[in-house]
Amino acid sequence: EVQLEAAGGGLVHPGGSLRLSCLASGFNFGGYEMNWFRQAPGKGLEWLSYISSSGGIIKYADSVRGRFTISRDDAKNSLYLQMSSLSAEDTAVYYCVRERFYFYYYMDVWGKGTTVIVSS
Amino acid sequence: DIQLTQSPSSLSASVGDRVTITCRASQGISSHLAWYQQKPGKAPNVLIYGASTLESGVPSRFSGSGSGTEFTLTISSLQPEDFATYYCLQLNNYPRTFGQGTKVEIK
C-alpha cells in the first residue's frame, strides 16, 4: 500500500525551529517529486515547497522562502522540512504529498499530516 | 501568482441532487487543474486531474470540465458520503495555488 507518514510536529515557541519528516512506503520514493502543503485551523490549503526527484530543483512559496528548507534522503525513503523563525501564522497541519505525472501533473497521494502549533 | 476563485463558497443540497462547482483562474492555465475532496480532520483526496480526467477509484458521478480560465466540477447525483469541502488546485505555475474551497452541506 502506498503511504506517506509525516512526523515531527508539536508545540514550539515563536521564533523557534522544528524539523518535519515524512516516511514513504509502498512505492519507489526516489522516482517521485514531492511537496509539502499546510492547512491552518479552519482555513484552506496552502502549497509550501517542492523538490524534484533528483533533489536538484526546489521551489518555495513566498510565505516560507528563507525560513523553510525542503530536502530528501532517498536511501531512507524520507522527505524533510526544516522550519525556522516560526510564528503563530505557521500553526497548521502539515502534509507531505507525492506529485505524479500522467499527461498532467497532480498531487495524488497525501500523508495524514502532522500538527505544528506555534505558541508561547 | 495565479488566483483561483471558486463559487459558490458553500451550498446546501439534498441526496440525489446534481451539484456544480466553478473555479475561475486569473490567467489561462490550459488544463493544468485538479479537484480535491476533503472531509473534516482528513487529508484531501484527488478526484479529477488534467481538468477532466477521473482519478482511478473515484466514482463516475464526479466529472470535470473546462480549460483556460474556467473549470467546473460536477457531481451528477449527490451521495451521503459526498458532503465535504472541495478545492481546485492549479499546477500550471509556481506557486501552486488553490481555490478557497466550496463546502457542500446537507439540505
Image (spheres, helix red, strand yellow):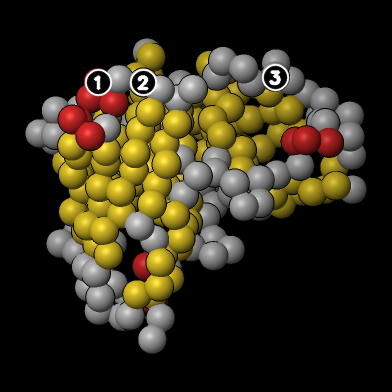
Estimate the x, y position of residue B49 in percent, counting from the top left.
49, 23
Left or right: where does residue B91 sit relative to residue A51?
right
Q: For the residues marked 2 and 3, what is the alpha-carbon distance in whole angstroms?
A: 24 Å
Q: Amino acid at mark 2?
A: Phe
- How packed mark 1 is, by other alpha carbons closer than 10 Å (few <14, some 14-19, many 20 or more), is few
Question: Which chain does the residue under circle 1 lie in?
Answer: A
Spatial CA distance of label 2 from label 1 is 9 Å
Furthest toward the bottom, the residue is: A120
Q: Which chain is mark 2 on?
A: A
Residue that badge 3 annotates: B59
* Whether residue A62 can be seen here: no
Mark sitting on residue A31: 1
Q: Position of residue B17 (x, y in %)?
A: 86, 32
**Nearer the camera: disc 1 or disc 3:** 1
The type of residue carrying mark 3 is Pro
Residue A72 visible? The answer is yes
Q: Provide the residue designation for mark 2.
A: A27
Callout 3: SS: loop
Residue at point 38% right, 86% down?
A120
Residues at marks 2 and 3 touching, judged by CB atoms closer than 8 Å = no
Graded by Cα atoms within 10 Å as few (under 14), some (14 to 19) or many (20 or more), the crowding at tag 2 reads few
Label 1, label 3: how far apart the Cα atoms are: 28 Å
Chain of residue at mark 3: B
Above or below, A56 relative to B104: above
Name the residue: 62% across, 17% down.
B57
Residue type at tag 1: Gly
Are the residues flagged by discs 2 and 1 in contact, CB closer than 8 Å? yes
Lateral position of residue A113 relative to residue B103, left or right: left
